[in-house]
């Protein structure tokens, strides 16, 4: 049986990219990043897309990419932090995937994003207020995941092991 997709969701800076790369090495499964696929398709970086075409344009691209990767199986999918805001994306990802949320506090996000220059939504004069606002507004979206792993204060190897435990539980 082809394994389901392992879908990492969670706020910006929660470690989706780092952990998905570790999982790729350990599990030998193909990893895709929705942000990377968008950048490759548009020949532009995410900040360039936001500044020249706007967020709505980016979200439409994101929806198409999610639809595409959701139709595959056995992937590790590193999702942009806003993917869960669109119910169509959640529905598509769940058809063939296990959604794992990386749960994180504002303090840890601020530590991890280091300025946030490549994240247009956090490239603002007061990132703390913005992170706190967005985390609050998105809380109920991230809890749509099948599983949640707490990120705060854990080194990468512990976190990777925590996510692996979830995967092993689902795919014994
Ligand atoms: C976004 C998260 C980013 C990227 C874009 C929008 C969001 O991805 O998709 O800047 O709305 O949370 P990361 O979560 O990988 O930073």
Image (tube, rainbow, N blue to C red):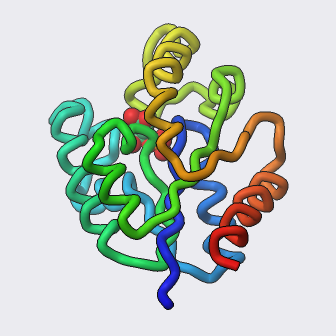
Q: Quadrant of the C terminus?
A: bottom right
Task: Please say whether residue 80 is visible from this viewpoint.
Answer: yes
Q: Residue furthest bottom?
A: 1
Count of residue discs: 0
Task: Report the front residue among 7 and 108.
Answer: 7
Residue, x 33% and y 46% (percent of image)? 45
Image location (x, y in percent) of residue 7: 50, 59
* Left or right of 159, for residue 21: left
Decide if residue 88 is on the left or right side of residue 142: left
Residue 146: where, in percent of width, then height? 55, 52
Q: On the picture, is 73 further left or further right than 65? A: right
Is 55 or 159 nearer to us in this picture? 159
Q: Quadrant of residue 66?
A: bottom left
Q: Residue at x 30, y 61 (%)?
A: 40
Q: Position of residue 76 (x, y in %)?
A: 52, 68
Does residue 52 appear anywhere in the picture?
no
Q: Position of residue 10 (x, y in %)?
A: 54, 41
- The front one of 13 and 72 is 72
Ligand 1 found in image quarter? top left
> Could you tell whether 44 is left or right of 98 in the image?
left
In-front residue for pair 66/111: 66
54 up-or-down from 23: above or below: above
| Residue at screen point 73% across, 65% down | 164
């Amino acid at each position: 049986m082809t394994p389901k997709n392992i879908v990492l969701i969670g706020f910006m800076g929660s470690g989706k990219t780092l952990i998905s790369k570790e999982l790729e090495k350990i599990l030998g499964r193909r990893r895709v990043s929705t942000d990377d696929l968008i950048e490759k398709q548009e020949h532009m970086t995410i900040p360039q897309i936001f500044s020249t075409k706007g967020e709505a344009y980016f979200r439409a691209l994101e929806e198409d990419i999610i639809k595409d990767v959701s139709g595959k199986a056995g992937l590790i999918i590193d999702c942009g932090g806003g993917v869960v805001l669109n119910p169509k994306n959640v529905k598509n990802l769940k058809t063939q995937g296990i959604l794992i949320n990386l749960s994180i506090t504002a303090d840890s996000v601020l530590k991890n994003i280091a300025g946030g220059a490549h994240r247009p939504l956090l490239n603002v004069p007061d990132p703390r207020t913005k992170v706190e606002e967005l985390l609050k507004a998105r809380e109920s979206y991230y809890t749509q995941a099948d599983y949640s792993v707490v990120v705060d204060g854990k080194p990468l190897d512990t976190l990777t092991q925590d996510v692996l435990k979830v995967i092993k539980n689902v795919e014994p």
